[in-house]
Every structure is written in structure tokens, then in C-alpha cells.
Image (tube, helix red, strand yellow):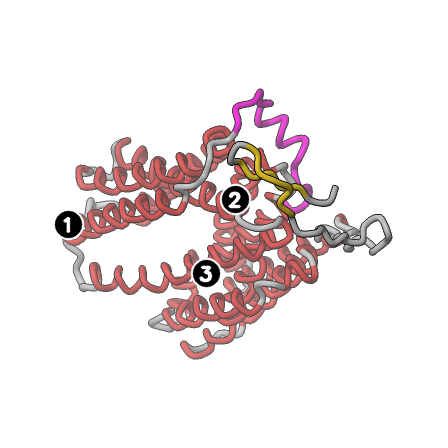
Amino acid sequence: VLGGTELHLGWVVGVGAVGSLLMRVSLGSAIDRYGPRLVWVASLVVFAGSCFAHLTVTDCHGPGIYLLRITFASVIAGIMGAAMTFISGRAPVERMAEMFGMLGTSGFVGIVLGTQLGDLLLGTETIQRWQVDRMFLIAGMLGLSAALFAWGATRHQTRPVRRRRLPSWRLVRRYHPGTVLLVGAAMGIGLALPATFLRTYAAELSIPRIGLFFGVYAPTAILTRILTRRLPERFGLRPMILVGLGTLTVGQVLLIFVSSEWTFIAPGIVYGAGHAILVPATLAAGSRAFPNRYRGLGTTLIMATFDVGNLVGAPAAGAIVHFSGKVGLPRYPTMFLSMAVMLALAGLVYGLTTRRSTRPPKMRPPRRTPLTRPVKTPALVDIGVDNGSRHEAGAP
């Protein structure tokens, strides 16, 4: 609508992603200092404001659209980080992955409903400015509605105790979760590929639609999250991460064999299952490496690795597609195979460097001994009345 091209779109989104990445550590520190409640609600309000402010944009070349995109991406990082941190404190640490998974399931529901809303608002052959303005208005109002829900969900939360805080870089150096950061970056690369390259891949194969891929992706992810929600607690996070990486690797390979619209079903199912298993396990493994008082920093750190993977992976995948064609190799199959090898190597490095399970050991109940055997306490008995007040006593 503003006269920009795909090149301008890429720059706007890329600059926003860089701004979001730079803001994540500060947002994590703010969550730990002020609590998830304040950051969550404030981020949602600023999110709505950034949506409304897009109504004033009239030029795709000036700094305004870039600043708004940076604000938009940064507050989404604040929303996700605060929500994840709040959820992580609602259950024992061994069930953290389950909590992340259930929160993420609501996100998949939002993806399904959001794509339908987008088609309703912008599903015409020619998109007019008033349609785009209406989209931003509705998105902003949804953000304000979400702020009310976030305020209600956290109404009983107490603010963190004020204490002397170490610099963020020292905390990251002390508590970083090791090669889980590599897993996060690899996951960012793998999960971003369909949204970025699936449409151009389909166009090269003369396939008109890709909706079937995402149509099975989201329901499979929701079902997998429900069916596997207790497995991290039972088997630990390390096996779940390895299974998730392996599943995404298989999904990359299956994309090579796509030849028609219906053949998107198999990779869509595998991709959805891998997403559902890998994301909550990786988030839990990264955030639980930090003490509870620094959980916000840990959560935003592992989410920042997703951004790093996206920033590195998308240009790398595009370069593979471009240069493989120059040397006579099949463009997209070479890219998908290269990404599959990358995911497999990340899983191998993670598996070799994490020799013991990330699942905390289960505490055995104490043995019943004469010292720990429960003693029945006699009922309280009335020993008299003195000046109208009852005095009761029991066995010592």
C-alpha cells in the first residue's frame, strides 16, 4: 500500500528483529526486578499503541516505520518473556515444560483463529489502505483486551523483594545453560523455514496453495502437546529435546519429496509434532538453569536464541537456494537437506555434551522409623474455666 517492495519488507522486519534481540536482556532484567505482572501488562498496552500508531505511517522509506517495527517486535518479546516467566512459577520445576507447553497450545489456537481473521479482513484481490488500517485497529483492540486478561491473571502476584543485583552479563555467564543455547538457535532456524520459504518453494513446483501444510501443522501441534504434556516430567528434558530435534530433521527431509499440494500433509504433521515437543522442553531447560529470582532473564535469554537462529538461518537458507542453482544443484532440496544436516549436528553436539538427564532427581519419601512414625495426639480437653475464659491443653 505504501509503495514498498519485498526488499523494503525484508529490511523492516529484519531491523525489527535486531531491535527485539537487543532488548531481550533488558526486558529479562526488568521482569526479575519488577515482576512479570508489570512488564506483561505494560508491554500489551505499548503493543496496542504501536498498532494504532501505524495508522499515521505514510512512507515506507522514512525512519518512522522502522521505529514502530522495533517497538512492535520488542514489546512482543516482553509479552512472551513475562508470560513464560509467570507460568514457570505456577508449578514445580519438574513440570515447567508442561506449563510452557500448555501456554503454547493457546498460542496455536491463536494462530488458527488469527489466520482466519486475517483472511476475513484482507482476503480481497486488491488490498486498500482502509483495510490495512482496520487490521491495525482490531489488532490494537485485541492487545488491550489481552492486557485486561493479563492484569486479572496476575492480580494476586506480589512484587519481587528488592535486593542488590549483579550485572546481567555476569548472571548469564554464571548460569547459562550451555549447549541448550545451541539447540535454541537451531530450533529458530528450523521452525522459521516454512513461514519464510514454503510459498516460494511451492511456486517453483507450480503448487498454488500451501494452506494445507499449516492446516495440519497447528492441529497436530495442539494434539501432540496434550498427549505429551507429562512426558518431560517422566523422562526428563534431554530425551524430549533430542526427540524434538530428530522430528524436525525428518520434517526437513520430507519436504524434499513434496510434489503436489496433498504431499504437504506428511511434512506438516511431522513439523507440528516436532514443534510441540521441542519448544517447551528447550524453554524449560534454558530457564530452569537460572535461580527463581533470575528466571525472567533465563527465559528471555533462551527466547533470544530463537531470534539469533532466525536472523542467521533465513539469510543462510536463502544463500543456499541462490548459489546451489548457480552450480547446477537442485535449489530447494539442497537447502532442506543442508538444514536437516545442521539440525542433526546440533542434536549430536547437545547429546554428547549433556551426559546426564536434565530431569531433577525424584525425592524418595522418608522411611518410617520410630522417630518419624506419626503419633496420635489426644483430643483437647477442657481443664477448667477462669474468669470466663476456656483453657485447653493437649498432649505435649
Secondary structure beneath label 3 = helix
- Give the x, y percent position of residue 69: 33, 39
In this picture, which residue range is highlighted in magenta?
Answer: 161-180
User: Would residue 327 be found to the left or right of residue 262 on screen?
Assistant: right
Give the residue at mark 3.
105
Please, what is the three-letter code of the amino acid marked with disc 3?
Answer: Thr
- Give the x, y percent position of residue 242: 67, 59
Taking the spot 26% from the left edge, 60% from the top edge, the residue there is: 118
Give the mark, 3 or 1, whose residue is nearer the N terminus: 3
Mark 1: few/some/many CA within 10 Å (<14, 14-19, 20+): few
Q: Which mark is residue 129?
A: 1
Closer to the camera, 20 or 207?
A: 20
Closer to the camera, 108 or 32?
A: 32
Q: Is residue 237 above or below residue 176?
A: below
Query: In which quarter of the view is residue 117 placed?
Result: bottom left
Q: Is residue 135 above or below residue 226?
A: above
Secondary structure beneath label 1 = helix
- Give the x, y percent position of residue 133: 17, 48
Taking the spot 86% from the left edge, 53% from the top edge, the residue there is: 369
Give the residue at mark 2.
303
User: Would residue 1 be found to the left or right of residue 298 on screen?
Assistant: left
Mark 2: few/some/many CA within 10 Å (<14, 14-19, 20+): many
